[in-house]
Amino acid sequence: MLHFRRTLTALAATSMLAAGSSAVAEEVTISVWANQGATENYRIDAIKIAADLLEREYEARGETLKINVEGKVFTSWSEFKQAVTLAGEAGTAPNIVVSSHGDIAPWAQAGIIVPAEDYVDLDAWPLNDIYPNLLEIATYEGQVWGIPQDAESRPFFFWNDYMKAIGYTDEDLAELADRVRAGEYTLQNVLEDAKKMQDAGLVEPGKGFWPRPTKGGDFWQFYMSYGGEFATDDGRLLFDREAMKGAYQFFVDAVNLGVTRKNHLGTPWDQWHGALTSGQVGIWHGGTWQYSEWTKKYGLDFFKNVTFTLIPSGGNERGRANTLTHPLVYLITKQDSEKEMSIAGELITIASEPRINALHAIKSAHLGITRSEEKVSLYANDRWTREATEVLLPYATAAPNNPNFGQYFEVMMNGLQAAWTGQKTVEQAVADAEKELKAALGDEIVFR
Amino acid sequence: MGNSKHLGLILLAPAGVFVILFFLAPVVLTAIFGFTNMSTATGISGGAYVVNESTMRALGERFGERELAGRLLRKSYVIDEAGLQAARESGAEQATIEELREKYLGRNFESRRQIERLLKKLDNRPASIRAIKKIAASFERSVVNIRFDSPEELVAAIEGYGIVLSDAQRQALADVSYTGWVFTTQNFKTMMELPDTWRTMANTLFYVFSTLILFNTGFALVLAILTHYMPEGPAGFFRSVWLLPRITPPVLYVLMWKWLAWDNGFLSRMLEPLGIAPRNWLLDTPANAWTFVILINGFVGASMGMLIFSSAIKAIPQPLFHASEVDGASRWQQIRHIILPQLRWPILFITSYQTLSLLTSFEYILLATDGGPGGATEVWALAAYKKALSNYGGALQYGYGAAMSLVLVVIGVVLSLIYLRLFNFKALTESPKIEQ
């Protein structure tokens, strides 16, 4: 395969020489793969805009460069990651990948991606304007591997009318975010209030509190609510038994109290969006980006109906209010062609410019990546991004860049599902998760 | 005769190539992968030798070489003649190199970024950011984060910086710095230790034999016999109806089941007036989930057995039925003494074929319950698929997944042998005595 490709490259090079390099306009095809929902087309389109600008820059310098951007859209994360990984192994990876920062560690170790910092100038605008904590999240083993593409966080949401119906005043609701942050309003209060809403007949049984309907990073927030942390100081994964128990127990309590259904996980997304935007659900948690779908597709009058806060603390001593941010990053894959990797670097640099990134941020209700984005009127005039940035982003934590985190994630989720659906007791689920992680990861994970 | 034998082999040769490529090679590769720790992070095509914080932590912990680890992690950059030479080789302009030599020869730096900043201020500034990066990298005097193809290259680079390694240190370094996969039997040990392994195995056996007995052979047999006693027209119609699940695209077919079972689906709506609260019938309890999983698979699986059994019944000489009717045999007696004995061979075939196919099929379960609720319908093939090829966080474990698949291959072979024994395969394939 490699030989074949080399032969092809050699042939191509020879024919170009024969044609005379000055006569042939240089043409490069850059492929971009992204997993994106309906409003997230700028993950790929930003690269197309960047390509147009870069072509003009070359032209202004008196050079000719034609860039063809080939985008490929995926709609399932596991499919997308499987495709990128296998293409990388086969030597046919796309030039640019838009993926989770969590993929940096395994893909870097496998040699599928190259450090972005080798191809972009982090000292120059616009990259020197990226929020430092986002760049930190894209760093692994002391190198910056990806350029943040968007940021978000995952709040709790409360339906205003029902909160008022069980005794909260407008002032109470206005202060709720602060009370959650201070640890005064905890997950126990969430269960109590959800129960009150059901008892008062405001929502149907099982719809007092609706978690995210599928597995996802969101559930780690409950581990953090009970004081859990992801990693030790020396970079090893950390399994906090008490916090894990707390998180599992919370969902079991919710089921026992009747405010959450035991088979909630697996609910179709459209059913979930439909129910909570039409006032069928009292309290739920989701992601900042879902605002765009709720307001545009489901016609929710967000600020009239909904109050949002951090994820409340579990109420135990180490517990804390928190939220998770899970930035996506532009990654440059390893290619034979140095030229393609350089152009990929130039493209993701341009795509990070505030005006271009703001298009994605506003259309998909994500948070911006650079400080100057706040000066772009499109971004500044948007109430949601402004308030969400203010209330949530300063308290956001990210999962670690560790090649073994994907495995930890699956084991944690499987344990949660087993406890939630009553297949295992909380103690058994935590003990089984510990056993599996010990067997699978050995010294790479610490239990506390 | 001899010639035609060869001719047969020659004619089959192209098919042989395909059999080896697409049937044999995957099994052999699965067996090999099963004894490795291959994953997304280790890659498939082999690894590199890298000094970084994690590998050096391992060097300290596993081999007690903390001092060496610390030294290897120290980064330094110096603009010297060797570095300038390397910069020239990486394509730097002569003027840039001259200016560097003139202004900065002998200067030390702590990070590459400092050199990059300095390069950007030169009169002969390199044209592109990539060129700046390459020149700056030429002055690095450490091996941190560089991917070396062999341990020898890594050691040579380290010794080039004046660090002398003992043989034991070289060995330890090669050991911890390797990012690729290694051969191991750990997958099977892990499998034995995990409580979920046994649950998944029990689920698999339950799924395979319930579907097999109730539908793929049981119900198929009922359909074949019932349609045998029907007039041709209606019989053909019924058989076609039972073929529909088989020819419906699986995604659509399962989607229709989901519409039936969702908490705002057909079942919930129908039962609501009777005072039964709407619920997700598919995932409500493990018993519900199993019922649906077996029905979904069984309706698809029954059609194949039905076709085979129907044609086998058709092949029974009609005089046997006529004679039995003259003797006053009831329908049941006909089934018991004529049809079933004649169907032993097709039943063996369907039983073994469908066992193997059910063992490895998981697509309908994946689409319907995805192994839920809480892993209650997680079968072996689905678990192997998830481990090897589907991970939300992208951490695919090819090695462990392959080890799980290998177990499935072994079970399939063992079960086939048992079936052959149970149905007395030898007697079934003996030449009929009457024609000798």
Image (tube, rainbow, N blue to C red):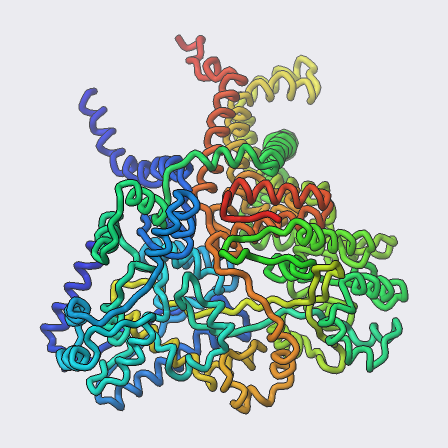
The quadrant holding residue A170 is bottom right
Question: Is residue A1 at least partly visible in the picture?
Answer: no
Residue B285 pos. (x, y %):
73, 45
Report the label total.
0
Residue B347 pos. (x, y %):
55, 25
Residue A439 pos. (x, y %):
53, 40
Question: Is residue A265 at least partly visible in the picture?
Answer: yes
Q: Is residue B359 above or below residue A152?
A: above
The quadrant holding residue A38 is bottom right
Towards the viewer: B264 or B430: B264
Q: Is residue B288 above or below residue A185?
A: above
Q: Residue at x 42, y 13 (%)?
A: B431
Residue A80 pos. (x, y %):
47, 60
Residue A33 placement, left or right of A62: right
Q: Residue at x 81, y 64 (%)?
A: A189
Residue A66 placement, left or right of A86: left
**Residue situated furthest left in the rendering:** A18
Towards the viewer: B172 or A267: B172
Tell me the quadrant of the picture where the N terminus of chain B can be found. top left
Tell me the quadrant of the picture where the C terminus of chain B can be found. top left
Q: Is residue A29 above or below residue A126?
A: above
Towards the viewer: B10 or A162: A162
Residue A283 placement, left or right of B106: right
Residue A135 placement, left or right of B243: left
Q: Residue at x 24, y 29 (%)?
A: B9
Towards the viewer: B124 or B398: B124
Q: Is residue A222 above or below residue A24?
A: above
